[in-house]
Image (tube, rainbow, N blue to C red):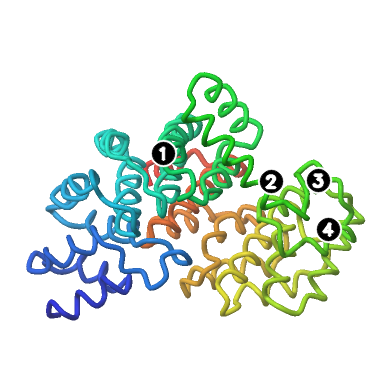
């Protein structure tokens, strides 16, 4: 393979580059690899994310791994306010997940958010350190809001913080910190205002969770995933069944996705044939939403779907381990470990990790627990 061919594979985020690096000397391609660590070559980063996890997966195979990690950390200060900066911070975040405390420290020392991508980077601190990371990021973004109040349209960080930390916990932490730090208070007020604007005509969470399905349906397309998931978790049996029939009747992907999100934490009560079909949709968002819903139910066909999703590296494979968790048979510990250990995509592995640990909590297997913990 020549340099241009390898560069095309890496910039496209293809697994063949990782396989080639595993079996061959890629030292001649060092500048190509470093460039792809430092710059985001995703075709549409807002939809598919950066290639940070993919690149760290690749460099973890190399004898000079530390060189690339050091170069990424050197590039964090003054990274700018674009997707390249987001990728570098994501890369460092994954390093921290692997126990690299220096990466975490450099991230905290280097974060100076800009109005365009500041929140995309800030989410990494919440992913790393929960409420502590949220308060740090809120202070940084709050300082930006104070100095440039009209240049930032926020909301992304707050949405993720509520999902990761819990809405009540995140709200309480911001209120307490905001009482003594005007930067945090500036961020909190902006987040509250942004949420109020986003819910105008939709309602607060207290109002949403009290809705019947008939009342919820006209608002579906305007609601975020975590709201629909929360509604589905606490809705009455009758309303959940009505929502299931609503999914069966939905004709466009947007309506199907929103209905499926109702069943991300509540089992779908009807025949799952439609969910099985949608899990293989060419629309990856639709396929993933269907796979997540399938992971809530016990049905013989769900096992077959899980194996097919992983075997063909389809979008819904993120939920494959959770599917087997609900449809367990002996020897599945070996199956899910092999899936997790062979997964090349860093983001998918990260999503699978929680399901892997939940699998062991539900189906204890002391003989393989050490291997699971070391995976």
Label 1 to label 4: alpha-carbon separation: 40 Å
Query: Gap between marks 1 and 3, in whole Å?
Result: 42 Å
Dot 4 or dot 2, earlier in sequence: 2
Question: SS of the residue at dot 4?
Answer: helix
- Secondary structure beneath dot 1 equals helix
Q: Nearer the viewer, mark 3 or mark 2?
A: 2
The 10 Å Cα crowd at callout 1, few under 14, some 14 to 19, many 20 or more, is few
Which of marks 4 and 3 precedes in the sequence? 4
x, y percent for residue 284: 55, 72
Q: Secondary structure at mark 3?
A: helix
**Disc 4 from disc 2: Cα separation:** 18 Å
Q: Residue at x 40, y 53 (%)?
A: 117
Residue under label 2, please give it. Answer: 196
Q: Considering only vertical position in the picture, is 371 above or below 267?
A: above
Q: Nearer the viewer, residue 271 or 10?
A: 10
Q: In the displayed structure, would residue 68 be above or below residue 122?
A: below
């Amino acid at each position: 393979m020549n340099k241009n061919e390898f560069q095309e594979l890496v910039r496209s985020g293809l697994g063949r580059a990782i396989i080639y690096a595993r079996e061959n000397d890629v030292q001649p391609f060092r500048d190509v690899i470093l460039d792809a660590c430092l710059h985001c070559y995703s075709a549409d980063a807002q939809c598919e994310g950066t290639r940070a996890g993919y690149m760290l997966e690749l460099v973890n195979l190399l004898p000079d791994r530390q060189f690339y990690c050091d170069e990424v950390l050197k590039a964090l200060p003054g990274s700018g306010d674009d997707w390249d900066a987001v990728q570098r911070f994501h890369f460092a975040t994954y390093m921290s997940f692997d126990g690299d405390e220096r990466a975490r420290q450099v991230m905290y020392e280097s974060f100076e958010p800009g109005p365009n991508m500041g929140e995309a980077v800030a989410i990494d601190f919440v992913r790393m350190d929960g409420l502590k990371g949220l308060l740090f990021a809120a202070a940084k973004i709050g300082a930006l809001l104070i100095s440039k109040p009209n240049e930032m349209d926020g909301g992304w960080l707050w949405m993720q913080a509520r999902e990761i930390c819990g809405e009540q916990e995140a709200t309480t932490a911001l209120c307490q910190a905001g009482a003594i730090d005007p930067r945090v208070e500036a961020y909190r007020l902006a987040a509250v205002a942004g949420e109020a604007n986003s819910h105008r005509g939709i309602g607060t969470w207290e109002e949403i969770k009290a809705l019947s399905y008939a009342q919820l349906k006209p608002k579906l397309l305007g609601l975020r995933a975590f709201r629909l998931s929360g509604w589905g978790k606490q809705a009455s049996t009758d309303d959940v069944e009505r929502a299931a029939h609503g999914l069966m009747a939905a004709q466009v992907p947007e309506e199907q996705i929103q209905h499926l999100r109702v069943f991300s934490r509540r089992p779908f009560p009807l025949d799952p044939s439609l969910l099985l079909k949608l899990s293989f949709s060419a629309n990856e968002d639709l396929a993933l939403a269907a796979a997540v819903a399938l992971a809530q139910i016990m049905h013989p066909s769900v096992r077959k779907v899980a194996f097919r999703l992983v075997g063909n590296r389809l979008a819904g494979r993120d939920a494959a381990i959770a599917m087997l968790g609900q449809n367990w048979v002996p020897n599945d510990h070996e199956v899910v470990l092999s899936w997790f250990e062979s997964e090349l995509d860093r983001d998918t592995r990260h999503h699978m990790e929680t399901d892997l640990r939940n699998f062991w909590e539900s189906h204890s297997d002391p003989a393989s627990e050490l291997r699971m913990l070391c995976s």
